[in-house]
Amino acid sequence: MMLRWIASDFERLDPRLFRSFLAVVRTESFSAAAQEASLTQGAISQQIAKLEDRLHTQLFVRAGQRIVTTPGGQLLAAHARAYMEHTSAFLESLNEEFESMRGQVSYAMPESCVHAPHFGWLLQRRLEYPELLLSIELKPSSDVLDDVQSGVIDFGFSMLPCDAVSMQAYPFCTVEYVLVGPAGACAPSPLANLDELLALPFVTYPDMINGLNRWVTGYFGESDALSPLALRVSGQFNDLRGVLAMIEGGMGFSVLPRHVVAAQLASGGIRLVQPQDAEPERAVRQQIWIVRRRDHRMPARVRRVIRWFLDMHTELQPVPQEFLN
C-alpha cells in the first residue's frame, strides 16, 4: 500500500510509539521487541497498529519466522531514528545549558596532582556551581587507568601511557622530575653514575619508581628499568607530605615532581641533587594525560569539568571534539 500521509495524520503521530516500532525493526520479531522494550507482545502489537492506522499503511509483513519491514516502514524508521537522535541532542543541549552542573563528577589522579595549581583553579570554578559534587581519589597511575576502564570513575589523570583500545587519552600537561635530599646530607653532587645514585638511602611512595626510572633514563641513559628491590629504602610513606617531612628530617632522598618540592627548595629545607651534565634542556619531564573510556557517554557536567582543566592550558587547543563527545 502506498503511503498517503496528510498533515492531520502526521500531527497525530505519537513519538512515544517510535521506541517499540524501532525495536521490531531491529529484532524482526514482536516477542523479542516486547522483551527489549519491557512490554507485553500484545502491547507492542497495539502500538504498531496505532502507527499503521495513523499512516494508512502496513509497516511489517510476516515472512516465515521473521517480521520484515515494508518500504513504508523503512521510511518511517528513518524518520523515527532522526527524530530520536534530534530529540536526544536537544535534551543534551538543554541539560548542558541549565542542568549540567547538578550532580557528581568523579575522577582520580596521582597525589602529586593535588600540589599543582590546577586543583586550586578547579575549586575556584566549582564555587560558581554549589550543586556540583566533586568526588576525587588519589591513586597511582596504574590504578587510575584500571578505574577508568572499569567505569568506576568518569575520567582520570595518568602519568602512564594508555594503549587500551577501549580508552581514550589526551595530553594535559608535563611535569619535571627532580632528585632531592636533606639540606645537610653528605652525598656526591653532581652524581657521576647509577652506582652513586643507588648508594643513596631512598624515601619511597606509591608511583615513585616510575619517576625514578624516567630520571635515570633521562640522565644516565639506562635502558633496564629499576626495581624497588634495587633501592636502599630508608623510609616509605603513602602521602607526599610525609615523604617531604622524612626528607627534611634527614632520612633519605627521593625523586619528586618539581612543583611538589618548590616551597621546600625555596626555604632551604631540602636541596636539589644534580647529575653531571644537567643542562636545562636535559630536564626530565613526564607527560600527564587525561584519560576516559572511549564508549562511555559522558554527562554534560563531566564534559564541562574536563573542559575547565583543558582551558587551563591554552596551548592544548583546539581539543578534538571527539574527546568530549
Image (cartoon, rainbow, N blue to C red):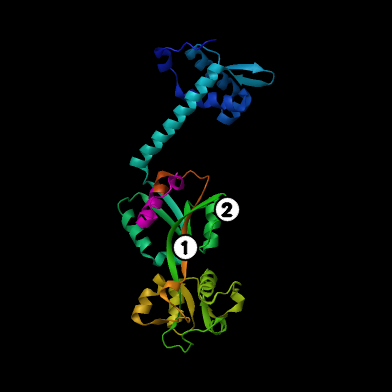
Residue 30 percent coordinates (x, y): 61, 23
169 or 251: which is nearer to us? 169
Determine whether 127 is above or below 257 in the image.
Answer: above
Marks 1/2 in contact by CB < 8 Å: the verdict is no
Q: Which secondary structure lies at badge 2?
A: loop
| Residue picked out by circle 1 | 287
Work out which quarter of the rendered image holds the C terminus and state it: top left
Viewed as shown, does residue 4 lie left or right of 312?
right
Q: Is residue 255 above or below residue 173?
A: below
The answer to whether 19 is drawn above or below residue 240 in the figure is: above
Amino acid at dot 1: Gln
Verify whether residue 165 appears in magenta: no
Task: Say which residue label 2 marks.
Answer: 164
Residue drawn 55% across the image and 29% down it:
37
Span colored in magenta? 304-325
At 42% from the left and 72% from the top, the residue drawn is: 281
